Image (tube, rainbow, N blue to C red):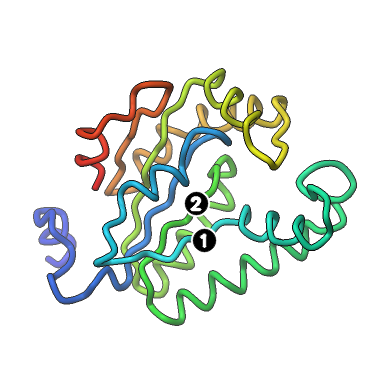
């Protein structure tokens, strides 16, 4: 009976819960604009915490004085970055905080593992898919201070393309946002908000 009611009622929170136990996964290739879209669709009333390994990569890169995202430096720091992200994720879950999980989501196995953890704690989860032309994403990635190899962007694009329909069928809430050059208009941001 509860499952039937849940599928019939589109609103899954009250005006008083302030996003508790809500999590949205953001999927998109590097340079697609996931972080940018996140900054545009938050209003401050309910401020989801952002889980993103990029924060720790940039933090450690600043300390070391070199971009640790490429080559042997990434191999050296990868486990530490993952550990820091995992600890942050656990702290946010313990606080029942609303979450935006900002990552490429190219690994379905890793994404569903995180989704399962969140659901086991009672979180409602969904996905926002940032659709971007691969050439536009490569162009944007070149303007970043942190290097993201073109080969990596193309391989993530291939993985995500294969997983898109799977993700669509998995998440009850799935929203797609077009963000190739010139596509992200105010009306699209408003509909995502």
Which of the 4 image quadrants contains residue 57? bottom right
Provide the secondary structure element on which disc 2 rests: strand
Q: Residue furthest top?
A: 135
Q: Residue at x 31, y 43 (%)?
A: 174
Q: Give residue 169's position: percent from left, percent from top.
A: 34, 40
Rendering coords of residue 152 (x, y %): 70, 31
> Residue 127, relative to residue 97: is it above or below?
above
| Residue sitting farthest toward the bottom | 94
* Contact? badges 2 and 1 (CB < 8 Å): yes
Q: Indicate the quadrant where residue 16 lies.
A: bottom left
Return the residue nearer the eye: 128 or 107: 128
Q: Earlier in the sequence, mark 2 or mark 1?
A: 1
- Disc 1 crowd, CA 10 A, few/some/many (<14, 14-19, 20+): some
Q: Secondary structure at mark 1?
A: strand
Q: Nearer the viewer, residue 76 or 145?
A: 145
- Which residue is depicted at the point 44% across and 47% down? 26
Mark sitting on residue 51: 1
Q: Is residue 100 left or right of residue 65?
A: left
Image side of residue 10 versus residue 67, left or right: left
In the displayed structure, 5 sits above or below 139; it is below
Left or right: where does residue 22 sit relative to residue 149?
left
**Image-quadrant location for residue 79:** bottom right
The residue at which mark 2 appears reads as: 102
Cα distance, mark 2 to mark 1?
A: 6 Å
| Residue 35 place in picture, x, y as percent | 47, 46
Identity of the residue drawn at 25% across and 43% down: 192
Q: Which mark is residue 127?
A: none
Left or right? Give the position of 9 relative to 22: left
Q: Is residue 109 above or below residue 178?
A: below
């Amino acid at each position: 009976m509860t499952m039937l009611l849940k599928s019939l009622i589109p609103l899954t929170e009250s005006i008083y819960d302030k996003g508790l136990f809500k999590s949205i996964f953001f999927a998109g290739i590097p340079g697609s604009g996931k972080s940018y879209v996140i900054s545009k669709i938050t209003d401050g009333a309910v401020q989801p915490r952002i889980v993103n390994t990029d924060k720790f990569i940039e933090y450690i890169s600043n300390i070391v004085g070199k971009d640790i995202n490429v080559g042997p430096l990434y191999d050296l720091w990868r486990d530490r970055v993952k550990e820091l992200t995992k600890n942050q994720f656990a702290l946010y879950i313990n606080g029942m905080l609303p979450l935006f999980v900002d990552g490429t989501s190219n690994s379905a196995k890793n994404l569903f593992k995180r989704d399962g953890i969140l659901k086991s704690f009672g979180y409602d989860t969904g996905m926002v898919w940032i659709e971007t032309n691969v050439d536009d994403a490569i162009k944007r990635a070149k303007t970043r201070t942190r290097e993201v190899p073109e080969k990596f962007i193309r391989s993530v694009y291939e993985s995500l393309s294969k997983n898109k329909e799977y993700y669509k069928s998995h998440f009850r809430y799935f929203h797609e946002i077009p963000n190739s050059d010139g596509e992200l208009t105010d009306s699209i941001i408003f509909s995502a908000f």
